[in-house]
Image: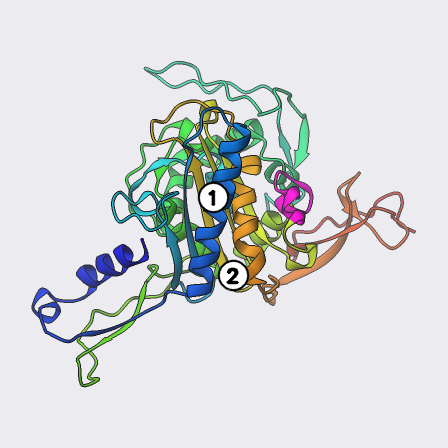
Amino acid sequence: ACCEVVHRQLRREYGETDLRTEGLRIFSTRDPLAQRAAERAIERKLAQYDREKRFGAVGLEAAAVVTDSQAGEVQALVGGREVKYRGFNRALDAARPIGSLLKPVIYLTALADPAKYTLITPLDDGPFVWKSRGAKDWKPENYDKIFHGNVPLRTALAHSYNVSAARLGTELGIERVLANVKRLGIDRDVRPLASALLGAVEMSPFDVAQMYQTMATGGFRTPLRSIREVTTQDGQPLKRYPLAVDQAFPAEQMFLLTNAMQGVIREGTARSLATWLPAGTGVAGKTGTTDDQRDAWFAGFTGDRLAVVWVGYDDNRAARLSGGVAALPIWGELMAPLEPEPLAPPKPDNIELVLIDPASGLRADGGCADAIELPFVQGSAPAESAPCAS
């Protein structure tokens, strides 16, 4: 599977004449430890799922991509449960709906406006209907079939509430959110439908890794690569086409989003990751589950690695798949033996850390029992103190 991504990069970045040269030496970015960990995690967990028949029939498939979260180098790639199979590669070519993996893009879009949106801005998770000419009314529901009233932005993301995310996305503008999908590095055309906000957008695991890579680097976008260098037989570098690195998003915006995505693991839909990695790892990530639970995803990054896992059936049958139950355990089993570095992104100069009382959303101090420290763009934190603050 890893060889296929190398071949594709060669064809993309080097001239056909150069590639016909005999005796080329190719230095790939593959990490044997990461590759073996990804293969073992998929083999072991899918065998377990088959034994338990937890998700219906046997024969679930999975795919995984692992990268260096800072350099954008592909360290491992697994295209299916037969890890040595050189045929159809699900990691590169299986474009499936990504579900809630798209939600961080909605919140990233909102956080571009700190005067209006912070991590504690209340969002309405009450009943919502989207009307569009020529289409049926769209009435998103939450996974638990419950409406949660007003919830802080960070909580809405941590618990992956559909209704508040859909309402926020439509208020921001569907096309504006989808434009940020492209800014994150995705070239696929996405129809500007409201359902796209909740992940009715098809991507391969490799595409998702590209999108989340830009988040992991603090907003710097560069194409994922699987080759470090190609030389002739005598060590002369082969001509290549340089890769551009662009700062696609401000560091402040990404710092806030990363903090919110760490909340997904601390208190949200990915809490069970504590089974595999200590809390101090500070993983930032997102679970994803699609309609009728046909696809399960988990994408997340640490200080040094990013990984994306997809689980589903090739025939796209409806199953009892969810990101937190089917994909996250593979991600955890993959990452644990690699002992990833903790995620501690550098704090931008104009970000301040403020103690907040969760009950009121106001400033707190040591006298507020449940106070949490949250980042704010300077000037956007609440000025008023909570009743519990002395």
Does 349 sit above or below residue 387? below
Q: Main secondary structure of the magenta part?
A: helix
Region in magenta: 264-275
Residue 146 placement: quadrant: top right
Does 49 sit above or below residue 351? above
Is 267 contained in the magenta span?
Answer: yes
Is 338 contained in the magenta span?
Answer: no
Q: Residues within 10 Å of mark 2 (few under 14, many from 20)?
A: many
In this view of the protein, which residue sits in the foreground, 348 or 327? 327
In this view of the protein, which residue sits in the foreground, 97 or 6? 6
Identify the residue shown where x is 50% and y is 60%: 305
Q: Between marks 2 and 1, how big is the CA–CA gap?
A: 15 Å
Q: Residues within 10 Å of mark 1 (few under 14, many from 20)?
A: many
Q: Position of residue 251 (x, y in %)?
A: 52, 61
Q: Amino acid at mark 2?
A: Ala
Q: Amino acid at mark 1?
A: Val
Q: Earlier in the sequence, mark 2 or mark 1?
A: 1
Say which of marks 2 and 1 sits in front.
1
Secondary structure of the residue carrying numbered label 1: helix
The number of numbered discs placed on residues in the rendered structure image is 2
Identify the residue shown where x is 62% and y is 27%: 125
Q: Position of residue 381 (x, y in %)?
A: 69, 51
Q: Position of residue 189 (x, y in %)?
A: 28, 39
Identify the residue shown where x is 58% and y is 48%: 261
Task: State the residue position of label 2.
Answer: 251
Task: State the residue position of label 1.
Answer: 105
Tell me which colouring the rendered structure shows.
rainbow
Q: Is residue 362 left or right of residue 18?
A: right
